[in-house]
């Protein structure tokens, strides 16, 4: 069974679509570990928001507010 350290090291691979054995090992661990579930959920949220935002410097004030609101709603 995977340990928390393994989950944190392989979380990106899992979110990218890991092979079946890793996927099931991760799911089993995440079913039992709330801290790792939170970590993977926050990593997924960060990746999702980063892909939508693009270049942060060109982000308008209204877009910034929307991002902050999404973060507050997801927590």
Image (tube, rainbow, N blue to C red):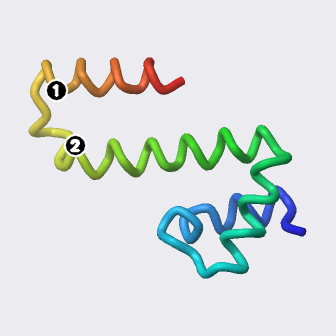
- Of residues 69 and 17, the one nearer the viewer is 17
Q: Do the residues bearing badges 1 and 2 touch, measured as CB atoms within 8 Å?
A: yes
The picture quadrant where one finds residue 11 is bottom right
The picture quadrant where one finds residue 42 is top right
Circle number at residue 16: none
Q: Residue at x 84, y 67 (%)?
A: 2
Is residue 12 rendered to the left or right of residue 33? left
- Where residue 67 appears, x then y in whole percent? 29, 27
- Where residue 54 appears, x then y in whole percent? 19, 49
Q: Residue at x 78, y 38 (%)?
A: 34
Q: Earlier in the sequence, mark 1 or mark 2?
A: 2
Tell me the element at label 2.
helix
Quadrant, the C terminus: top right
- Of residues 28 and 47, the one nearer the viewer is 28
Circle number at residue 63: 1
* Disc 1 from disc 2: Cα separation: 8 Å
Q: Residues within 10 Å of mark 2 (few under 14, many from 20)?
A: some
Q: Is residue 59 above or below residue 52?
A: above
Q: Is residue 42 above or below residue 40?
A: above
- Where residue 28 appears, x then y in whole percent? 80, 59
Q: Residue at x 66, y 70 (%)?
A: 23
Quadrant, the N terminus: bottom right
- Where residue 7 appears, x then y in whole percent? 73, 61
Circle number at residue 53: 2
């Amino acid at each position: 069974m995977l340990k928390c350290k393994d989950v944190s090291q392989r979380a990106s691979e899992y979110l990218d679509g890991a092979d079946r054995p890793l996927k099931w090992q991760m799911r089993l661990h995440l079913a039992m570990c709330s801290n790792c579930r939170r970590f993977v959920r926050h990593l997924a949220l960060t990746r999702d928001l980063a892909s939508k935002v693009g270049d942060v410097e060109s982000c308008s004030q209204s877009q910034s507010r929307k991002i902050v609101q999404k973060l507050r709603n997801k927590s």
